[in-house]
């Protein structure tokens, strides 16, 4: 029999302890590896969130450029997303260049600012390039990840005044039965007001009657007494009051002779099969237009069909038997579905009252026009009319339109000092080129007919800025009051101030200019009287549209306008490495 020695009695215990120690070490290592993997996973997730936030900041900034010239807006402002973990983003730097080589930082950029203030527009003639850096951060506490994304873009100005059919910086007044028709993009003939549309305060007790607008209606203020069909959305920063007809659709029988709703394409309307079809339009996602939003007040509907969604920050006041608002259409009459619940309760087809988070429509800046003869010559023959004798000026303009100068019929007449330029009643003007009247006074007509002479204005010629002289194979008859003429337009010539008529543009009854194009601009009032026919655009402090007026929207581009915004063509995108330029 073997007998163990005294020194061997604890070996089993030691072996067990050592084995347990090894297992513990392995467990600790596995735990630390797991923690490390979790930390790395969390870190990788935050890195991904941070770069996406930085890219989103850049993309969001770029999306605003077509609607603003204030390229320094929003730089350095940080926004926080409602996510977990915390994600923040900002446009941390914008640098602008006039030559594409030397860049100046906007205020708020990571380089000491020397640029104009954020509210200062930069003229298109001077601005060529931007470098934009977006910053994204993800996480809180000790583990915060920051990444930066950058692009360099080359800019081209969106010129020609405005992308709207009528732009009223302070307001628009619409009387009975105007027809605002699109050009080439279906329902693109927008009406935009920086103030109210048809309110009693601005316009008195007028009503728009049976109007047709082949586009949306936006107002920063309130919209009142709108009656007719609107082939887009209605959106106000204040209250909205709609009377009869529809938003988002029209019936063929409402159209004037020679025009058809089914011709509105693209986007092409969806129509029922009636003899007089009811047609509605859809956006790029397939959702019907017809949304009506009262972001700052009540929404009132009377006998109105809305083919979209209705929301208001105040009450929903519907004439419940005759008002509808729904993307869903019933099988009878192609109308929006009726509200199955209570008006304003937020259920399908019932609209939403007291809605939170509503905002005014996107703000569109009023273009400014600066006269510089070098913008026009030598493509145009420029004439300085400085006699102060308005009758003599009108006679001179009429004569030169007929004869041209050395074979050139593209003429610009600059009238300074300004005077009340009155075109003779019942005159007929036959254009063989573009006529532009830049005046520091007013302009008015009555029963004026302007036509394009046969065989004229059908070439691909361009002006000094590369804009087509005759974009629709029509001559242009443009009347423009420069921005600097009126130091304080709101207090001097826009209701409710007393309007002296000093800088107004007024086309009298039965003005027929539907075979020419026309862009009319004044910081004061633009009036188009009843039974008139015009192609083009109108931009003014207040736009007044009279009974049975008809306009076909043609977006026109002429020199001298500070752009409404910019198109941006990216040269590159990159992630900023530490210490890299402009990062």
Image (spheres, rainbow, N blue to C red):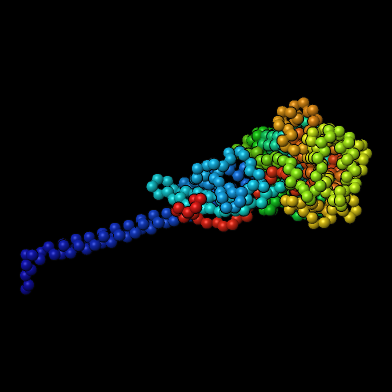
Q: Which percent across, then down, holds residue 567?
A: 65, 51
Viewer-nearest residue: 579 or 298: 579
Q: Position of residue 420 (x, y in %)?
A: 84, 32
Task: Identify whether 423 is placed above or below 461.
Answer: above
- Report if residue 304 is visible in the image: no
Quarter-of-image position of residue 425: top right
Q: Quadrant of the N terminus?
A: bottom left
User: Residue at left 73%, top 43%?
Assistant: 372
The answer to whether residue 349 is left or right of residue 6 is right
Is 517 on the left or on the right of 36, as rendered?
right
x and y, in percent, of residue 118 in the image? 58, 40
Q: Please state which of residues 245 and 45 is positioned toward the viewer in this rendering.
A: 45
Q: Position of residue 276 (x, y in %)?
A: 85, 50
- The residue depicted at 74 percent of the width and 51 percent of the height is 464
Q: Is residue 165 visible?
A: yes
**169 over 125 or under it: above or below:** above
Q: Nearer the viewer, residue 21 or 486?
A: 486
Q: Residue at x 36, y 56 (%)?
A: 36
Q: Residue furthest bottom?
A: 1
């Amino acid at each position: 029999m073997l007998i163990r020695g005294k020194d061997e009695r604890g070996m089993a215990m030691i072996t067990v302890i050592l084995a347990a120690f090894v297992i513990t070490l392995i467990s600790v290592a596995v735990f630390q590896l797991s923690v490390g993997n979790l930390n790395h996973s969390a870190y990788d997730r935050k890195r991904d969130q941070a770069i996406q936030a930085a890219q989103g900041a850049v993309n969001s900034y770029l999306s605003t450029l077509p609607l603003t010239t204030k390229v320094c807006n929003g730089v350095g402002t940080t926004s926080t997303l409602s996510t977990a973990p915390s994600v923040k983003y900002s446009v941390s730097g914008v640098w602008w260049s006039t030559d594409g080589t030397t860049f100046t930082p906007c205020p708020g950029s990571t380089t000491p600012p020397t640029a104009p203030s954020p509210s200062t527009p930069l003229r298109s003639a001077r601005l060529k390039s931007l470098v934009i850096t977006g910053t994204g951060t993800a996480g809180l506490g000790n583990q915060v990840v920051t990444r930066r994304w950058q692009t360099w873009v080359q800019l081209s100005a969106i010129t020609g005044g405005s992308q709207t059919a009528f732009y009223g910086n302070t307001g628009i007044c619409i009387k009975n039965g105007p027809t605002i028709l699109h050009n080439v993009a279906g329902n693109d003939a927008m009406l935009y007001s920086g103030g109210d549309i048809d309110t009693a305060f601005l316009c008195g007790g007028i009503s728009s009657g049976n109007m047709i607008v082949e586009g949306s209606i936006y107002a920063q203020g309130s919209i009142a007494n709108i009656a007719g069909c609107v082939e887009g959305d209605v959106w106000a920063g204040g209250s909205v009051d709609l009377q009869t007809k529809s938003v988002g659709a029209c019936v063929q029988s409402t159209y004037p002779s020679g025009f058809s709703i089914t011709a509105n394409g693209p986007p092409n309307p969806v129509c029922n099969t009636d003899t007089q079809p009811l047609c509605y339009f859809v956006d790029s996602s397939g959702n019907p237009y017809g949304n009506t939003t009262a972001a700052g007040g009540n929404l009132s509907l009377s006998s109105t069909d809305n083919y979209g969604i209705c929301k208001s920050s105040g009450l929903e006041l519907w004439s419940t038997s005759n008002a509808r608002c729904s993307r869903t259409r019933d099988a009878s009459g192609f109308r929006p579905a009726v509200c199955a619940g209570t008006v304003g309760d937020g259920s399908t087809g019932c609209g939403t009252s007291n809605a939170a988070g509503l905002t005014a429509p996107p703000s569109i800046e009023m273009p400014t026009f600066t006269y510089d003869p070098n913008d026009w010559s030598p493509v145009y023959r420029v004439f300085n009319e400085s006699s102060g004798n308005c009758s003599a000026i009108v006679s001179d303009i009429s004569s030169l339109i007929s004869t041209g100068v050395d074979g050139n019929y593209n003429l610009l007449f600059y009238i300074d000092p300004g005077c009340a330029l009155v075109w003779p009643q019942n005159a007929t003007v036959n254009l063989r080129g573009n006529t532009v009247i830049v005046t520091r006074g007013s302009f008015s007509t009555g029963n004026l007919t302007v036509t394009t002479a046969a065989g004229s204005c059908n070439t691909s010629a361009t002006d000094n800025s590369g804009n087509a002289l005759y974009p629709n194979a029509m001559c242009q008859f443009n009347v423009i009051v420069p921005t600097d003429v009126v130091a304080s337009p709101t207090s001097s010539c826009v209701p409710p101030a007393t309007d002296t008529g000093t800088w107004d543009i007024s086309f009298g009854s039965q003005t027929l200019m539907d075979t020419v194009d026309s862009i009319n601009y004044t910081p004061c009032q633009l009036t188009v009287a009843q039974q008139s026919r015009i192609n083009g655009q109108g931009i003014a402090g207040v736009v007044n549209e009279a009974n049975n007026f008809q306009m076909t929207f043609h977006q026109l581009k002429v020199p001298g306008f500070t752009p409404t915004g910019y198109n941006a063509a990216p040269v590159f995108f990159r992630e900023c490495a530490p210490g890299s330029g402009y990062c």
